[in-house]
Amino acid sequence: MRNLTLKQLRYFEALAQQGHFGRAAEVCAISQPALSMQIKELENSLGAPLFERGPRQVRLTDFGESFAERVRDILRSVDELGDLARASVGQLAGQMRIGVIPTIGPYLLPKIISELKRAYPSLDLHVRETVTSRLIAELAEGRIDMAILALPVSEPSLEEVPLFDEEFVLIRPAADADKPVPDREMLREMRVLLLEEGHCFRDQALSFCNLQGRQPRELLEGSSLSTLVQLVSAGIGVTLIPEMAVPVETRSAAVAVSHFAGPEPRRTVGMVWRRTSPLASQLQKLASIVRQIGEG
């Protein structure tokens, strides 16, 4: 077997993730024929096929699945060597891959990016927005350096740093502005709009409203907070959103924003990263910046 190259392994990982030569080629910034040739050379070197090729997608063979696990470990170790070199500089510089959940990203990231660019002009920021479960998986696989999300994540391999607490507010149609704010028992009898499955904010809202046992037909779902607020503006139920989202999501909606009587529903926003990351001291500095922005 000829020596494998890191380039081939990264191409393989991209194709394994994307399941499509065209999309993987875009991710790798090469042509599709060049990617196909590199994968074929890799398979020839290994003496076994890594992918089952279909007309619209490709999928890993059994051998490909096992190979993918080893490749992820290798690439993560290589990336950590790069992190070690960056850590030796002693300041925030070079590439920083930030993950963030959708109920935080649109509202906090613009301020974070602006401040980081001002304070650390040599920092090359890459942002990935997705749900908590995917961010945790991508952290474990070394695809991102850290994530900003709601705590706790309760993952032993990750360091959790609380940043600030944030209230949830009730969004109602503007016509309901003068009505008493419902408590959690009253919410059980109302049509509540929630984010779709997979969002941790959905679970937090369900917990506060005591709605875990309700049938799906009693709840309406949306893919984003913006969708939920616009549905409320149209008179279809009520929803909860984090306080940081209020200025953005309510500026063009005919809704009323109300605070619950104590104890208010809330979440703890925090940062997480791998306990083994050589960038821990730099990430602590970044956490301090995000904390100041969140508390401000």
Image (cartoon, helix red, strand yellow):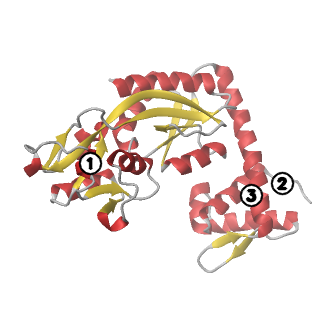
Q: How many C-alpha atoms fall within 10 Å of the one at disc 2: few (<14), some, or many (≥20)?
A: few
How crowded is the residue under tag 1: few (<14 C-alpha within 10 Å), some, or many (20+)? Answer: few
Looking at the image, how many numbered discs can be counted on the residues?
3
Residue 272 at what x, y percent from top left?
Answer: 55, 34
User: In the picture, residue 90 is in which quadrant?
Assistant: top right
Question: Amino acid under label 2?
Answer: Leu
Query: As drawn, which residue projects farthest toward the front?
Result: 185
Residue at image location 71% in from the left, 28% down from the top:
84
Quadrant (top left/top right/bottom left/bottom right) for the N terminus: bottom right
Q: Which residue is mark 2?
A: 4
In the image, 208 versus 18, the foreground residue is 208
Q: Is residue 17 visible?
A: yes
Foreground mark, 3 or 2?
A: 3
Mark found first going from the N terminus, 1 or 2: 2
Q: Which of the 4 image quadrants contains residue 17? A: bottom right
- Image quadrant occupied by the C terminus: top left
Coordinates of residue 162 in the picture (x, y in percent):
48, 28
Q: Position of residue 194 (x, y in %)?
A: 33, 55
> In this rendering, would 237 be left or right of 294?
left
Whether residue 41 is visible: no
**In the rendered structure, are the residues bearing label 1 and label 2 in contact, judged by CB atoms less than 8 Å apart?**
no
Separation of disc 3 and disc 2 at Cα?
14 Å
Which residue is denoted by mark 1 in the rendering? 185
Task: Please name the residue that numbered disc 3 is placed on.
Answer: 68
Instruction: Determine the residue located farthest toward the bottom in the rendered image.
Output: 55
Element at label 1: helix
Q: Are marks 1 and 3 in contact (CB under 8 Å)?
A: no
First in sequence, mark 3 or 2: give its number. Answer: 2
Mark 3 crowdedness (10 Å alpha carbons): few <14, some 14-19, many ≥20: some
> Marks 1 and 3, how far apart in space?
49 Å
- Residue at 24% of width from left, 46% of height from top? 249
* Secondary structure state at the residue bearing disc 2: loop
